[in-house]
């Protein structure tokens, strides 16, 4: 069975990893010669360790090398159990209302933004720990489609349209000389 490497291990090119080192690597203690990790790096390490525990507790236990996009979807659905975002169903009278006036029995789920950020961190951690980008299960098409579906479903349920921010093109410089008229005239 594959195990998970310590995020800071120098032999991160090795795809077999050691799950026993996970608890000690995430303890937050740093030796005098090491620098403190950024908030992002700490979160990435915690997410990686949590995913490692999920694989270890999976029935039957699942190795990282056998992990596919379908397993990642299973993990994301498992995380919904601890979600805090109310997602109204189409049958709910508050479906499409950003601020419902009363409670309803609709399920709590993980917010799309949280899932999207989580997948980004796990995708990076997979490659940092020796995984090849071509075989990265966190970048699988099924995972991307699932995230898009969750985003669309949640935005409709809240009545908020999601518009992807587009990069503005750089201002074009014209080759023509500006007119010689003084400012204020014309």
Image (cartoon, grey):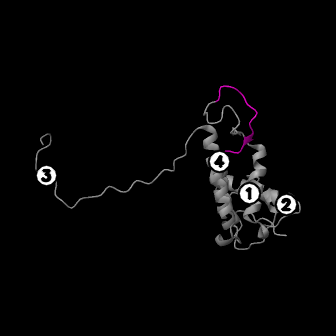
Crowd tier of the residue under label 1, counting other residues whose Cα lies within 10 Å: few below 14, some 14–19, many 20 or above = some
Q: Are marks 2 and 3 in contact (CB under 8 Å)?
A: no
**Which mark is drawn over residue 179?**
3
**Front position among marks 4 and 2:** 4
Of circles 2 and 3, which is in front?
3
Where residue 10 sits in the image (x, y, percent)?
A: 69, 70
Measuring from the top left, give residue 183's x and y in whole percent: 14, 43
Q: CA distance from mark 2 to mark 3?
A: 72 Å
- Residue placed under numbered mark 4 in the picture: 112
The residue under the point 61% across, 42% down is 156
Question: Does label 2 or label 3 sit earlier along the sequence?
Answer: 2
What is the C-alpha distance between the residues marked 4 and 1? Answer: 13 Å
Give the spatial CA distance, label 4 vs label 2. Answer: 26 Å
Tag 4 near tag 1, CB within 8 Å: no
Q: Judge depth for marks 1 and 3 and give the one in front.
A: 1
Say above or below: 49 vs 18: above
175 vs 132: above or below: above
Residue 56: mark in rendering = 2
Q: Name the residue carrying label 1.
A: 73
């Amino acid at each position: 069975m594959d195990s998970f490497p310590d995020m800071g291990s120098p032999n991160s090119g090795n795809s077999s990893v050691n799950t026993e080192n996970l608890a000690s690597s995430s303890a937050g203690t740093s030796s005098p010669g090491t620098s403190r990790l950024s908030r992002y790096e700490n979160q990435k390490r915690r997410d990686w360790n949590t995913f490692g525990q999920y694989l270890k507790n999976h029935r039957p236990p699942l190795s990282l090398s056998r992990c596919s996009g379908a397993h990642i979807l299973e993990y994301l659905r498992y995380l919904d159990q601890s979600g805090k975002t109310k997602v109204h169903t189409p049958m709910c009278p508050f479906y499409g209302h950003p601020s419902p006036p009363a409670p309803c029995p609709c399920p709590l789920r993980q917010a799309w933004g949280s899932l999207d950020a989580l997948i980004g961190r796990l995708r990076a951690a997979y490659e940092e720990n020796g995984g090849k980008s071509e075989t990265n299960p966190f970048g699988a098409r099924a995972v991307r489609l699932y995230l898009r579906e969750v985003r669309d479903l949640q935005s409709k349920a809240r009545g908020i349209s999601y518009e992807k921010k587009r990069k503005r093109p750089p201002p074009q410089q014209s080759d023509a000389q500006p007119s010689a008229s003084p400012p204020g005239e014309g």
